[in-house]
Amino acid sequence: MNAIAYNLIRCVMQQSAQQHDVELGRISFKGSLDTVRHFADAIHATTGKPRRQSQLYQELLAIIASDKLPWRPDRTEPRARKRRPKQYQLLNKPRRQMRVIPHKNNYRVTDCKGLS
């Protein structure tokens, strides 16, 4: 269901980009999603009026085309892990039953005496 909704929003974005001569990569997906949500009730309310529906849809496309992302040359977004894996065992039992596994020497056992 999510894939269908995503593809529908992308289709509306593409129609908007083609009609208003805007680069597709500059149109905001989140802005398009919000705009479609706001227009959905108004378009649905004009079910028996195809001319008004068409007019609302054209307004929708114009608003989507006007909501452009800022131009950011040389911007890269590398994929990387932000949080490193911890060297502690997983807590897969209740805390009172959990014990440190002695044969796993890659887990650190910390001394809490200095913390109080």
Image: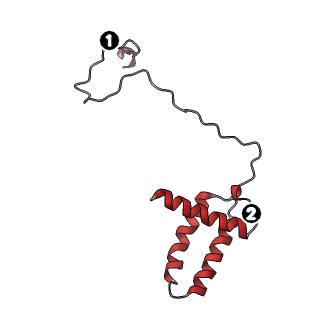
User: Disc number at residue 103?
Assistant: 1
Q: Kindly report the distance in space between the C-alpha atoms of the residues bearing marks 2 and 1.
A: 61 Å
The residue under the point 51% across, 31% down is 83
Q: Amino acid at mark 2?
A: Val
What is the secondary structure assignment of the residue under circle 1?
A: loop
Q: Is residue 49 left or right of residue 71?
A: left
Q: Amino acid at mark 1?
A: His
Q: Horizontal and vertical percent for residue 70?
A: 72, 54
The residue under the point 57% across, 86% down is 50
Q: What scheme was used to colour the molecule?
A: secondary structure
Which residue is denoted by mark 2 in the rendering?
22
Picture quadrant of residue 31: bottom right
Q: Nearer the viewer, residue 61 or 5?
A: 5
Q: Horizontal and vertical percent for residue 51?
A: 60, 87
Picture quadrant of residue 74: top right
Residue sticking out furthest to the left: 97
